[in-house]
Image (cartoon, helix red, strand yellow):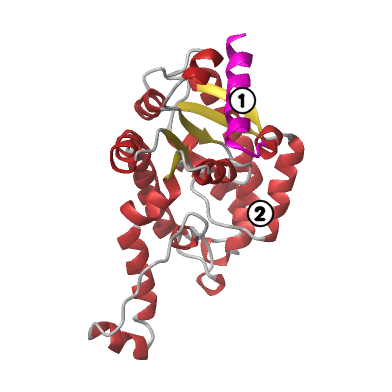
Amino acid sequence: MIYADAAEWTAAEKKRVLLFGMSGLGKTHLSQLLRDSGQWFHYSIDYRIGTRYMGERIADNAKREAMKVPFLRELLMTDSIFIGSNITFNNLSPVSTYLGKPGSAAKGGMAMEEYRKRQGQFRDAEEKALMDTGYFIERAEALYGYPHFICDTGGSICEWVDPEDRADPLLSEVSRQCLMVWIEGSEAHTAELIRRFDKAPKPMSYRPDFLERVWGEYLNENNLKEADVDPDAFIRFTYARALAHRQPLYEAMARNWGVSITADEAKAVASEADFNALIARALERRTG
């Protein structure tokens, strides 16, 4: 870890933190709070993915749909209109929409072959965005003069790493740049995340072996063919399994590469001073 203990963290003139864990437990809340203090640069991995690494794919997908409408097709062919995505830190819907859901086209799904391809594109984009962390630390200080840096990662970071491998290239790089901090949810938080997801299911990204396993289970348990799958029903089926699949990966990341705080602790943070004190306590718990 780049800070050996609480004293080193507290004394650091340049604080660098990477938050990881399931979406909905406070990563973006803490990042925005620190950004609003005026001393922290907020680097959003999902924003970087959607603007730098998947921006053209997202825009082209929207254009492809627009080309199916004769009125819009004519305007696009004559360069009379422009189609792009309006991605912000608080609105990453274009990325989710592009990822999509597998299943019946009549219900808004896509073929599993196309879904797998987009999953692979997202993995490549996320890995590149994470590897850009050091560049943005330097850029934030040199260009804007920010002394501190907060990296707000997506929930799928754990899908692309082996936290038990001390030579894992992705974890080696980001831990060299930042203190890795897991926001850990309780069973009650997990139940609430599942309830929210069931109400409004959103696309996610998974490692290939996990996706193939749950896809096969869903088809077999429901005696369905690919074209008959309700896309929302499938990703609801997958979500709770994804939480259980990711939990030990997050735990290993915190154990081998960083520290952990609870979602309740994250929620209680109301200022930069609160955050700094919380990270100091997390380091004390680990080193004590």
Residue under numbered circle 2: 197
Q: Residue at x 59, y 28 (%)?
A: 248
Instruction: Assign a secondary structure to mark 1.
Output: helix
Query: Whole-Å distance between the Cαs marked 2 and 1?
Result: 32 Å
Check if residue 191 falls in the magenta segment: no
The residue located at (55%, 16%) in the rendering is: 6
Question: Is 263 placed above or below 46 here?
Answer: above
Q: Is residue 138 left or right of residue 10?
A: left
Relative to 130, residue 102 above or below: below
Mark 1 is surrounded, within 10 Å at the Cα level, by few (under 14), some (14 to 19) or many (20 or more) other residues, namely: some
Residue 139: x %, y % from top left:
30, 40
Task: Answer with the quarter of the image where residue 262 lies.
Answer: top right
Q: Which mark is residue 277?
A: 1
Q: Magenta stretch: residue 281 in it?
A: yes
Q: Which mark is residue 233?
A: none
Nearer to us of marks 2 and 1 is 1
